[in-house]
Amino acid sequence: MNLLKKHWPLLILIPLFSFLIFFRINWLTLVNWDEAWYGSIAKNIAATGNFMKMDWNGKIYYHHPPLGFILIALSIKILGNNEFAVRFPSAILGVGAIILIYFLGKRLFKSNLVGFASSLIIGTSVWYLIRTRSGDLDSIFIFFYLLTVFFSLKSKENFKWFIPTMIAFAALLLSKTLVGASAGILILFNNLNQVFKSKKNLTLSAIGVLAFLILLVPWYYVQLTSFESFYREHFIAVGMRNKTFLSYFHIETFLPLFYLHMGVRKWYYIWLAALGLIIITLRFIKKNFLLILIWNVIVLYPFLTTNETHIWHLIPVYLPLSLIIAGGVFWGKEFFIKITRLKKLDWLANVFYVLFFIFISSWQIRNFYKEVYPTSHFVPDDVDISKKAAKYNVQIYLDDNFYPVAIFYSGKHIYSLIDLPDPNKKAVPFFENQQGEFVLITRNYTLRELDNAGLKYKVLDSNSFLSIIKKND
């Protein structure tokens, strides 16, 4: 009971964001590409138990480390092979991240009001909410990033927490390729001066690093020793987006900042104002503000050096952004009380502080509600035809780009015409040249092309846009 009194905002935050994240989460089918792609990989892990050598449609997969896929696979094992199971790990850890950022804000600023506001900010940033409701890896990554930073702050006060910090850091790096490495800078900022204070701390440091390596190294060792192209594709192509060292000095701000604005909406300009206040009043010399400013720089700067990014890539920036806004506005309130000497009205300022964030959060939810929440159980044509393809026990070819959706919902090995040599990349020459028994998933207008070419076929299944056909010799 005392814990609930001490952390009363959680009585609001947990029910609120559990509802916002889980509401109608399974009403829509998995999305092409990544969500259905990751769901298929996790489904294979659930079936085989092999996460050291992940595969997708018979091809090896190592773009991202296995932790997120393992969690989705466990969910599929328990909840079944469905959309809810694929999205459940993201959703539950999305709620967990709301709780973690509350504790981070409270710890950094000694105020549960700042923790409350921080949670409201990130939880009502539209792209955070969208990704916590999907079967992608972002929400899992965000949870372990926050857990790493939270544990590193606790280890400043009690160095025994350094071991959990390094375990969380390993989990972070096993969640998504390279992006979480920036948390290492925050660990050093928080804990480096503690390492050499005593022999006990040195021992704890060694144990923490050892635990980190034991968790992280095995998967990477297997990939590096098994697959020649792993280093190039995993680290350079996926992790660094093929960027060179010099490209990090080439600033491209427009698109990344536009995406950041679109991702957090109303919070964007409040973030800029809070940054201005922190800098003008020299508040950045305080360790709590310095930490979140460093955090903001290290996660945002790489995106400011490229226009080859997507809106969801910037979600890690939302974490320090939320703390900067909540902490900056709280400092603005305290600064106002200090210069006006109205200490007796501090309670009223706190009320206005809370109401301000509740108002903006409500405004955000009102604006993005229709964007986030489906109004019906809609099944697209690509999912419908993929489910129908599940009953065919012959080679299945796909003449379209919904490759991951077809694989997940059919549960079959799918051959894509795109991967075939010319001229078989096109439906008409493929249908003319292909020997043996097979079925082809193609668009309905392709049937007219087959008719014009004088090729005989039989429609086995169809819907308003797609058909499954076979040769009719």
Image: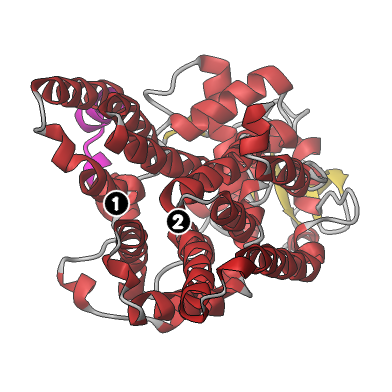
In the picture shown, does residue 14 fall above or below 282?
Answer: above
Residue ID at (81%, 37%) = 388
Q: Which residue is mark 2?
A: 316
Mark yes or no: residue 432 visible.
no
Which quadrant does the C terminus fall into? top right
Q: Which residue is mark 1?
A: 182
Residue placed furthest toward the right? 376
Give the crowd class for mark 2: few <14, some 14-19, many >=20 residues within 10 Å: many
- Identify which residue, 275 or 426, lies in the foreground: 275
Mark yes or no: residue 394 visible.
yes
In the image, the segment drawn in magenta is 217-231
Work out how far the residue at label 2 is from the one at label 1, CA to CA, in angstroms. 10 Å
> Would you say residue 220 sits in the magenta stretch?
yes
What's under tag 2, amino acid-wise?
Pro
Q: Are marks 2 and 1 in contact (CB under 8 Å)?
A: yes
Q: How many numbered circles are shown?
A: 2
SS at badge 2: helix
> Would you say residue 421 sits in the magenta stretch?
no
Question: Looking at the picture, how far across and down is residue 320, in whole percent?
Answer: 43, 59
